[in-house]
Amino acid sequence: MGKITVILEFGGKSTEHEVSIRSAKSIYDALDKKKYNVVLIGITKKGTWVGGDAAFKAIQSGNKLMDGKSNNILLPDPTSPRLVKSNLAKISKTNSLQVVFPVLHGPMGEDGTIQGLLEMANIAYVGCGVLSSALGMDKVKQKEIMQQYKIPVVEYFWFKKNEWEIDSKTVMDKVEKRFKNFYPLFVKPANSGSSVGINKAHNRKELKDDIGEALEYDIKILVEKGIEGASEIETSVLGNDDPVVSECGEIIPREEFYSYDAKYILDNTQLIIPAKLSKKLSKKVRETARRAFMAIDGSGMARADFFVNKKTGRVWLNELNTIPGFTSISMYPKLWEYSGVSYKELVDRLIGLAIERWKSKQKIKTSKD
């Protein structure tokens, strides 16, 4: 069969554009070029797909992706699932099995949109499908699903932008009533990642300001009750029908919470692997992560983030991240490395899982004839 063609997609119309480029660089370096024919496709902040030198320069420099001389297209045509140039000249080889590795953090990449296009083109791809990606991105809908499966989540309230624009005072009154005037509260865009637009409100004035900032990133806002004294614990999930879960890791931010700056700019966050948990509590976290992954019908990968009270043993799922960071300092690959799966092996396994799922779907009937 020859080499497998891996189409590494990165960048995107997202506030996490730069993080995506860093993740793509790490994956590109780890891919065995003797085993894979690697095609780089970067998506600019305007949404243009570019390849060639422009894409390669972006991952080597870590700079924002710029438009190239030749743009690319993926046609939603299952009879010819090929990347083409804008003049319809084929890029990828027709006799090579293709797998797309999307490293598109945040909206327009992690939310089921790119996954839908890949499904229409009938191309194998790494990570969760359309439904699970959408549920992973929308923190409100994800929480509603978790509650159906009796997986504990942090107490929350949500509203939409139009409600705020009609009567912001009433919305704030509802928020404070919901939490019985308890502070601090966390204000989040419902559809974002890497803590973009997330703030911790200690009073009503900060709540108003933080909602205003969150509305710059989404039209749906989530407000959560702050859990004092809880540790931030993460674990990594890998697999399709029978997923496995890594060892747990603990995050100790020097800032007030694990913000975007704390994750990617400031070098002052402590990552502890393994987390300082009892065996019983660690097992509970990992079992909950597996249940949550299966609750959204996950496949391939996800990072599960928790709040854990070590004294009481209570565990709350914060969120599942279906395209976790893959930079050199990202927790998803670091947790697997500690658990005995090297970065290179992890990338190979994810590609294998994508092919496994794609082959299984090829057996599904699409006609009664």
Image (cartoon, helix red, strand yellow):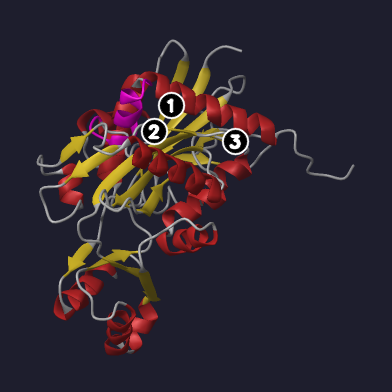
Q: Nearer the viewer, residue 231 or 352?
A: 231
The residue that disc 2 covers is 51
Q: Amino acid at mark 1?
A: Val
Residue 167 placement (x, y as % from top left)? 32, 89
Q: Which mark is residue 241?
A: 3
Q: Does residue 220 appear anywhere in the picture?
A: no
Q: Is residue 336 magenta?
A: yes
Q: Which residue appears at 26% of the width and 36% of the height?
A: 275
Q: Amino acid at mark 2?
A: Gly
285 left or right, relative to 75: left
Q: Does residue 1 appear anywhere in the picture?
A: yes
Q: Which residue appears at 46% of the width and 41% of the height?
A: 287
Give the residues in magenta.
328-341
Q: Nearer the viewer, residue 153 or 266?
A: 153
How packed is label 1: few (under 14 Cα within 10 Å), some, or many (20 or more)? many
The residue that disc 1 covers is 39
